[in-house]
Amino acid sequence: MKDYIKKLVRQLGLRLSLLLVMVIISLNVVLVVYYRNVMIVNSEISQQIQIVKNRLNTMESHIWLGDLGVRAYLIKQTDEFLNPYMGARDNFDDNLNNLEDDLKVIGFDIIVMKPAKVAMIKYMETLRLMVDLCDAGKVDEALEIFYEDRGFTAWQQYSPFVQNANTYVNNLNLKSENEYKNSINLILLIQIILIIISIPILTIAFLKIKKDGTFRAHIFNLIDKSNRNYLFDDGRGDEEKNEDDIITNLIANLKKSAGFINSISKGNYEIKWDGLHDKIMDLNKNSIAGELNMMRDQMLIAKGEDEIRIWANEGLSKFADLIRDHQNDKNQLSEKLISEIVAYMGAQQGGLFFVKEDEQKQRFLELVGCYAYERKKYQEKRIELGQGMVGQCFLEGETTHISNIPDEYVNITSGLGETNPSNLLIVPLKINEEIVGVIELAKLKKFESHQIEFVERLAESVASSILAVNTNEHTRSLLEQSQQQSEEMRAQEEEMRQNMEELQATQEQMHRKNEEVESLLKQASENEVSMKLQMEELENIQGDATSSHEKIKQEADDFRSMLMDILNEVPQKVFLKDAEGKMFIANQKVADAHGLPLTELIGKSDYDFVDTETADKWRKQELEIMKKGEEKYIFEDSIGGKKTILESVKKVFHIRPLGQNGLLGIQSDITEKVELENELKMLKNK
């Protein structure tokens, strides 16, 4: 029998031990869960009790602060004295409702609270009434209410409630603490019993665990190999490590992985994996350390590309604003433009050349702005087309980038001496194959490819602006020439009118002389031949005057036709309205926008194209502009069925043929520019 028991113990001892251990562990788990629940319940009750106490104190504080603030406000009506009341009033209702809810949670009889709640609300309303009376200047009435001492009545109502609530809360807290202590004592007793039972069981389990040492060592060896193969191989190979070292290395590598990923997610692409160097890089090609290192490099490249794109878009937007602010003054635009380009590009010198024509109509490049070491150099410089690298760049129409500048081509002077820049960038100001100038930049450091591309894009924008400025100046010159010629025509018409009056007077005089001649013909027959010659001369004068009038009229028609041809070549919309808002002059682009032939557009007003309400609104705006003299604004135009964004300049213009003031308008299409700025904003938001 004894042998059988020993054999049974050897065969089933470990299993029974494990089973008993599991039972003990289960009991411990149950006790832990029970203990945890007791702690949670006790903690929740304690927290709820504390919340109720805080709300009771806050409620009394609100009443006290409200009463204090109103008392001070009765003495002196200033906002500073009223602040305690205002704070108490704003939070009183929420705190009172929350107190009622919290008392319900802990089981307090809310019916006991209702009289106190009503009394407190009435007293707060009384305080509000006194404040309103003071604000209305009825301080005496407020003082009468104050002397009634309604606060004492309210205190008699809510003071017993506060005492009852505090007593209830204290009793509840005491009950909770007693239950917690009893639970701890029970758990302690059960734990002692379980310890006594578990001693022999643990002895048996220890013997079995000792046999599992080999298996455990094998498992840790596998963990170490997996750590080196899949996380990070530090190059130490298969040297012996204890279990603590294996676990420490595993945790350290996991922390490195988490820290590396966290740093990358925060934008730190300079992070390095501690311990990863070139000698062991091949060992970690397929490990998490190697993959994360590769991912960091790729994200660093992407970040650099994003920074370059944002830098370029911000620069284009900045220079677009600069061009728009100085588009009416080419000299100031060139000075501002070259200095800002040099600063933005990190260059040391820069020059801006525009195409000009001399008196012989020969084109050349003129230096209109230059910048060196943060100071402007005002000098005149003329470069013939094809002369030097600047002139050659203009003829070829392509960007020139030189990394080895010839000696003495240009030097940079500082307080330490003279230095030759090593890089030169020359970009033509070209748009739609038309070149209007050249930008030249000199730099000590190398021009990066994205910087060259940026200057080329900027050159297109500058070229477009220069063309627009030239067109505006040409348009103004044509308009001034047209006004001058109109004045000359009026002078010629006046002269012709005077000639006609003189001719008429001459004819009347001739008629009188004819009568005199007829009466004296018999007495002066010898003067007959002379009189006939005079008559023929007068007829010739009359014919010449008629021919001159027709010639002047033809010249006026030809001049008007020439003016319309010039206006049709202008890229902007140009129109002139009379005092009644009707088209007096317009170019073909205005007619195309309205979908009408130019001849049909003249004489029409906005009332012929939009509804009366819209036309009235536009007419009112135009009359206000005529009063002010000039206005510049941007708006969205949909006439013709196509939405465009226009920059409009309108000003008063005297129409001499009509003898009245009209409205001159010049409108430029800036749709593409606005779309570019919107794209830049979207990139920034990303």
Image (spheres, rainbow, N blue to C red):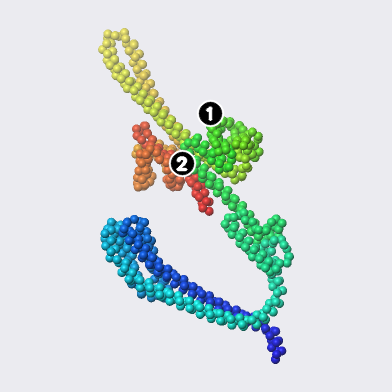
What residue appears at the point 62 percent right and 42 percent down from the top-left corner? 445
Q: Earlier in the sequence, mark 1 or mark 2?
A: 1
- Is 342 placed left or right of 240 in the picture? left
Query: Is 225 or 516 nearer to us in this picture?
Result: 225
Where on the picture, by quarter, is residue 151? bottom left
Q: Amino acid at mark 1?
A: Asp
- Label 2, on which residue? 668
Q: Image quadrant for the N terminus?
A: bottom right
**Observer able to see residue 269:** yes
What residue appears at the point 63 percent right and 57 percent down from the top-left corner? 295
**Observer able to see residue 584:** no
Q: Residues within 10 Å of mark 2 (few under 14, many from 20)?
A: some
Q: CA distance from mark 1 to mark 2?
A: 29 Å
- Is 598 placed left or right of 355 in the picture? left
Where on the picture, by quarter, is residue 573? top left
Q: In the image, residue 583 lies at what x, y percent?
A: 38, 38
- Label 1, on which residue? 358
Answer above or below: position of 641 versus 45: above
What residue appears at the point 57 percent right and 44 percent down from the top-left corner? 454
What residue appears at the point 35 percent right and 18 percent down from the top-left corner? 539
Q: Amino acid at mark 2?
A: Ser
